[in-house]
Image: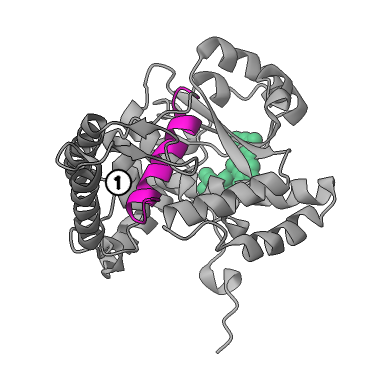
Amino acid sequence: MALSSPLSSLLSFCEMLCVKECCGIESFDFAPVHIASWLQQSRGEPAQKTIGDLKQQLGDFKNRFGTASDTEGYESGEDEMNQIFSPEQVDQLADQLLTNLEHAVALTEQSNIVQWKPDGAPATTEHHPEFGNQFVRALAWRYACKKFDANRHVSAEDLETILNATNLSASSFGLQPYQLVVIQDRALQEKLMPVSYNQTQVRDASAVIVFAIRTNIDEQYIKDNARLTEQIRGLEPGTLDQYAGQMIGAIMGMDDEKRARWASKQTYILMGTALAACAMLGIDSCPMEGFVADEYDQILGLTDKNLRATIVLPVGYRAADDEQAGFAKVRNPLDKMVVRIS
Ligand SMILES: Cc1cc2nc3c(=O)[nH]c(=O)nc-3n(C[C@H](O)[C@H](O)[C@H](O)COP(=O)(O)O)c2cc1C
């Protein structure tokens, strides 16, 4: 018997996270944080209902195949966990999942990143004009920092917030044809300075984020993305096959150079999001195109990872004597920037 959604979707998601993000060994840890991210991803669904359905399914699973049943346990197929579970193991698995689900719900409620509410309505649907004002103020505060204070460090939590925000950027077809390379290694940062036209920001920043395009986008990558969407949204495998075919036609129809240009445009969208996220956190940054991409690729071993650097963002805190911080912002007035047609 194959398990149905939402339980099957949760299992696939946890497996995928374990394989991709953890140790690389195919395993299911059902860590609360993984379950929490699955809950977060499926926030379009009424979350309470999803949680209720899951609990119901786990209870049914235990009753049907656990020690209270007269079966020999549960044999999961290749699409699931590909294992034989004795009745005792079924009980253990269901109980562990139920406990971790409770932890995951608590995590989701605590998180300041997750905008999920118990009734399933994303908090961001509410109109908050004051956020707009804060956002504009933050953008007016930010500037391209020329001199960082090498002794001040961005906290691990803030750095994760910047990365999370950046990961929420829009991308063409949602294909995210890029990766972020995060460097927090003074010796390596020193090496990058001469190939960044001696701009000191890369040496002194608390972290340097290199935005890199993937150079190995192929049919499989696109199919994997469609599969991921199916898993996260609890769709039957194959639902998005036709859509994947359209994406493959569009993306693989480009020659390598055009595809690289397409991908690199997406990294500039990332940069915009990252700059805004830093500004909201009161963290300084400097978008940089002034570096020799081939040298970065070589020093950071990006070519071997099928990556190519396109743009760089040192982040940290401004030095007290960075003159640039005191300069007035120079922007065209809105009537020069905006063409209104109504
Ligand atoms: C794509 C791009 C590349 C940039 N490259 C550099 C750079 O290599 N070094 C630098 O100090 N500033 C760089 N800047 C910063 C701009 O000079 C700066 O954003 C612009 O002058 C506006 O000033 P503000 O960001 O301080 O408001 C770059 C900005 C962008 C958007």
Prevailing SS of the magenta stretch = helix
Residue at image position (60%, 77%) is 339
Question: Is 262 on the left-hand or right-hand side of 29?
Answer: right
Question: Is 269 on the left-hand or right-hand side of 130?
Answer: right
| Residue type marked 1 | Ile
Residue 216, percent across and down?
A: 73, 38
Residue 209, percent across and down?
A: 54, 31
Which residue in the structure is indicated by mark 1?
113
Classify the position of ligand 1 by quadrant: top left, top right, bottom left or bottom right.
top right
Q: Residues within 10 Å of mark 1 (few under 14, many from 20)?
A: few
Question: Is 73 on the left-hand or right-hand side of 23?
Answer: left
Is residue 321 part of the magenta span, yes or no?
A: no
Furthest residue in direction front, as rendered? 70
Residue at image position (45%, 35%) is 82
Q: Secondary structure at mark 1?
A: loop
Residue 79, percent across and down?
A: 49, 44
Residue range in magenta is 1-24
In this view, the residue in front, 162 or 317, is: 162
Q: Which image quarter is the C terminus in?
A: bottom right
